Amino acid sequence: MEPNQRIAYISDIGAQGLRPLFIAGSCVTTIFLDLSFAAERWLRHTGRLAKNMGTVEKVLSALSIICAIGGTAGLILLSIFDTVHHPTLHDGFLLLFIAGYILSAIFICAEYQRLGVHFRQHRVLRASFWAKLFFIIVEVVLAAVFIGTSFTSNKSIAAVFEWIIALIFTFYVVTFCVDLLPASRDHQKITNAQFGHTDGAVAEHGDAYAMGNGGYGGDRGARDAGVNGRTQQPQRRMAQNY
């Protein structure tokens, strides 16, 4: 921290005693976020989520993944090249991180907008689109203020905006849980349908078994009636003779 700075940057804290935790947290967060991008792409390809209806949507999805990978590289590298020992590299990787994920959000918003035209009944797409659009607008404004104040004497103000940017980025990560939720519910419906089919098969087997028992009981009753009839015939003859 500089002498006139009262609020620490996230990078200032991560460059000191918490440096291993800062690097590990940056790696885990961004790698799992990229995996969610890949999972969403795969689920759309297999039809578990609303499928891409054209080439443009697939290209937008691929561009969003590429930009997210760039943002991932920026965050991991800025955590390694800390602001104390490598200030110039750190600032460059910070810009790469911010620009990568903002561009990724722009491309994924464009993809969702096109998907919403074909799947108007999917409210999750609409909600996720507006959430990511909010992220883009707010983060662009905050990033401009952060960059503008970072190169002036207002280091404390810049630090405040850096913390706000990080908090909003956390909510952006959470929106992907909402994106993947319909795939989980569809899987549950399929599972329930399979269990329902199994129960129906068991019930059908039980009915057949009951009918079989009923038929066996009917045959047995007929045989008993025949035996009783043959037993009663000699008795009637004896009565007549008497």
Image (spheres, rainbow, N blue to C red):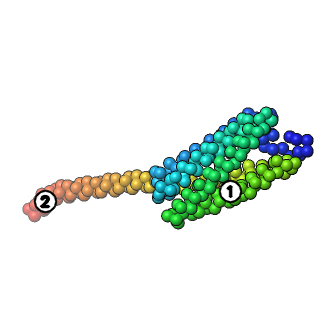
Q: Picture coordinates of residue 190 (x, y %)?
A: 46, 54
Judge from the rendering whether residue 97 lies leftward or rightward of residue 17; answer left or right: left
Asked whether residue 150 appears in the rendered view, the answer is yes
Residue at horizontal 80 percent and vertical 35 percent from the top? 84
Q: Nearer the viewer, mark 2 or mark 1?
A: 1
Q: Residue furthest right?
A: 3
Residue at horizontal 30 percent and vertical 57 percent from the top? 211
Judging depth in this view, the residue of 104 and 152 nearest the camera is 152
Q: Which residue is mark 2?
A: 233
Q: Disc 2 and disc 1: Cα gap in Å?
A: 97 Å
Q: Secondary structure at mark 2?
A: helix
Judging depth in this view, the residue of 53 and 31 nearest the camera is 53
Amino acid at dot 1: Phe
Judge from the rendering whether residue 217 lies leftward or rightward of residue 78; answer left or right: left
Residue at horizontal 50 percent and vertical 48 percent from the top? 42
Q: Which mark is residue 135?
A: 1
